[in-house]
Image (tube, rainbow, N blue to C red):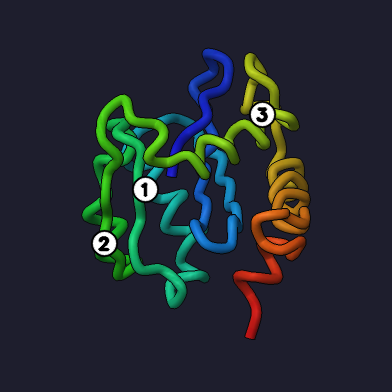
């Protein structure tokens, strides 16, 4: 998990990427407080609770409510080492893909939930070479 910061408005996007399927979930938060970020994570991941085991976070203070998230989602939290973005390469790469739709300097206050869902849908329905040309959605939700 990581955050993408918008223009100085304070709003941000929380990005969550499942490691094996590359399935991406994006949540908009009004600010980067631990409470706002934790609530967004819990709301978006609760429907996927049965598939969750561990969560790996960036070292930002916005993830300091990880114990509360673990209690609700019945997961275990881990943190990447400081200044070691390569430990979360998939998430960093996904943030770059999201930036194709929401470039640097954009004000996330002006982005609608529908626009976020559209980007999420595009990313999750994009065939990936590393998945043998399957989509993240088809891998995560296979029976």
In the image, which is nearer the foreground, mark 3 or mark 1?
A: 3
Cα separation between marks 2 and 1: 14 Å
Residue identifier under label 2? 76
Residue identifier under label 3? 99
> Would you identify the image quadrant in which residue 71 lies?
bottom left
> Would you identify the image quadrant in which residue 93 lies?
top right
View extreme (left): residue: 67
Between discs 3 and 2, the one toward the N terminus: 2
Q: How far across and down, in percent of the image, does residue 104 sit?
A: 64, 18
Q: How far across and down, in percent of the image, does residue 107 sit?
A: 64, 20
Residue 49: which numbered mark, if any? Answer: none
Residue identifier under label 1? 38
View extreme (bottom): residue: 143
From the viewer's perspective, tell me whether residue 57 is left or right of residue 106.
left
Name the one closer to the observer, 42 or 50. Answer: 50
From the viewer's perspective, tell me whether residue 77 is left or right of residue 119.
left
């Amino acid at each position: 998990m990581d955050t993408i910061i918008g223009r100085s408005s304070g709003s941000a996007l929380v990005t969550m990427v499942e490691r094996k399927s590359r399935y991406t979930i994006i949540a908009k938060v009004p600010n980067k407080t631990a409470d706002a970020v934790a609530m967004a994570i819990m709301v978006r991941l609760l429907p996927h609770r049965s598939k969750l085991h561990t969560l790996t976070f960036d070292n930002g203070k916005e993830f300091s409510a990880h114990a509360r998230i673990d209690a609700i989602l019945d997961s275990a939290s881990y943190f990447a080492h400081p200044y070691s973005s390569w430990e979360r390469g998939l998430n960093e790469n996904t943030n770059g893909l999201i930036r194709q739709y929401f470039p640097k300097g954009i004000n996330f206050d002006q982005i609608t939930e529908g626009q976020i869902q559209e980007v999420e849908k595009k990313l999750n329905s994009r065939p990936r070479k590393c998945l043998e040309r399957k989509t993240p959605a088809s891998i995560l939700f296979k029976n």
